[in-house]
Amino acid sequence: MTEQKENTTSKIIEEKETSSLKLILALGIAGLISGIILVGTYIYTDPLIKANKAAATQRAIFKVLQGCDSFTTLVLENNKLLEKVNDSDNQDTNDKDELVVYAGYNTSKELIGFAIPGSEPGFQDIIGTIFGYDGSKKVIIGFEVLESKETPGLGDKIFKDVDFQTNFTSLAIEPEIVPVKKGEKSRANEVETIAGATISSKAVVRLLNKTMAIWQQTIDDYIKENNLKVASNDE
Amino acid sequence: MNELDNKSQAAQEFLKGLWKENPIFISVLGMCPALAVTNTAINSLAMGLATTFVLLSSSILVSLLKSVIPKQVRITAYIIIIATFVTVVDFSLAAFLPAIHKELGAFIALIVVNCLILGRQESFASKNTVGLSILDALGMSLGFTFAMLCIGIPREILGSGSLFNISLFGDAFEPWVVMILPPGGFFMLGFLLLGFNWYAKKKSQNATDNKLAK
């Protein structure tokens, strides 16, 4: 091993005379080839990656808004929700700083509710979610975690535990959502936290309260302004 | 005779990575993925295959270009080559296997700094023919994947009660959550290293005993 090392060192000394130009050229060419490969891969995979992301969002929207058949994307501009025209050339404009919600409609074009993305720091990292909100009843009707690095077996129960998920079938958001211990839920605005994952469950509650504070008024206005027909839940 | 030698050398280069110089159990390289993404069998396998692709492609390229790359900038050149292939893997996984890409997260990008890969370029691919480099890379990465599965399979069985996401024991099984948490990685790796070292020691002892007996 040491012999090998000595060999390479002596070789390096021998070739120390290599001109800097040659070194720069070698690295430059390596960088150029690497760049070409990367650009090629990017051009090929980028539409697929974007389609995957869009499909994941769409799946989540249909999941949190039961009975949803179609949805429109709404962008917040000057405290007002504006319908976003989905032209395919402008896909890149979906920037992260743009605040977006999705309005979901059933087959008879009646409004079911809004799918609202929201994120909040959890125990390990940001928890990224999307949840369904029924604007007429002011209740949360569905909840789905899109991104989470919560502890496997504990914090990840926020999306694996069926009991916790049932908290969000009809959760009143007024006056505000309150976390309570398991089995102590008595009011419509209470969420039963998960034993052993209190931080993660409380993060979810915080996320819902925070996100609804941003959206509630705007969504109310939007429903009134556009005279949207709201689907009755009896069907 | 010469051909036979070549053949046995080729076989040796391929086989050494699987067992005798196994990157994880013997050389103890690539500990970051070995501990971090072996919480399920499928993640271990995906990481193993991603590493295989990167190691194989960079070994081919490095052994092809070994006479062109000036010695002074070789490490930089290797890193550029490795990083390129890692990014290709990163993009491809995101495009074709988004679920696995999400699970492995940042650890895909971290393949760049896996010493196993740079180590093989420096100590093998830059000194040998393309053919031998391919065999070496295949052997090493299969050995790596095998070791990843050795850690990942028991961790998933004990920690989640499932294997490749198929539930094994039903609801009655209370999973050992610790096995899928970071300490579980250390436990499993520790036990396996213990086993390997014990076996190696026993083997060498037997060999000396036999010699003495003769």
Image (tube, coloured by chain):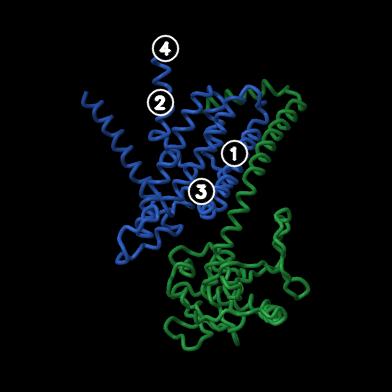
Subunit of mark 2?
B
Ranked by sequence position, the earlier of labels 4 and 3 is 4
Q: In this view, does A90 lie above or below B119?
A: below
- Please name which of the two marks, 4 or 3, marks the residue nearer to the observer: 4
In this structure image, what is the colour of chain A?
green
Subunit of mark 1?
B
Which quadrant of the structure image shows residue B121? top right
Crowd tier of the residue under label 4, counting other residues whose Cα lies within 10 Å: few below 14, some 14–19, many 20 or above: few
Q: Which amino acid does label 4 sit on?
A: Asn
Q: Is residue B39 above or below residue A32?
A: below
Q: What residue type is labelled 1?
A: Phe
Q: Are marks 2 and 3 in contact (CB under 8 Å)?
A: no
- Please name which of the two marks, 3 or 1, marks the residue nearer to the observer: 1
Mark number displayed over residue B32: 3
User: What is the spatial separation of the Cα atoms under label 1 and label 4, in whole angstroms?
Assistant: 36 Å
User: What is the spatial separation of the Cα atoms under label 2 and label 1, in whole angstroms?
Assistant: 27 Å
User: What is the spatial separation of the Cα atoms under label 4 and label 3, in whole angstroms?
Assistant: 41 Å
Which quadrant of the structure image shows residue A230? bottom right
Q: Name the residue under label 1.
A: B85
x 64%, y 69%: residue: A102
User: What is the spatial separation of the Cα atoms under label 3 and label 1, in whole angstroms?
Assistant: 19 Å
Crowd tier of the residue under label 2, counting other residues whose Cα lies within 10 Å: few below 14, some 14–19, many 20 or above: some
Crowd tier of the residue under label 3, counting other residues whose Cα lies within 10 Å: few below 14, some 14–19, many 20 or above: some
User: What is the spatial separation of the Cα atoms under label 2 and label 4, in whole angstroms?
Assistant: 15 Å
Q: Are marks 1 and 4 in contact (CB under 8 Å)?
A: no
Ranked by sequence position, the earlier of labels 2 and 3 is 2
Report the front residue among B54 and B202: B54
> Residue B207: x and y, percent?
28, 30
Q: What residue type is labelled 3?
A: Cys
Pick out the residue farthest to the front.
A108
Q: Mark 2 points at which residue?
A: B12
Q: Mark 4 points at which residue?
A: B2
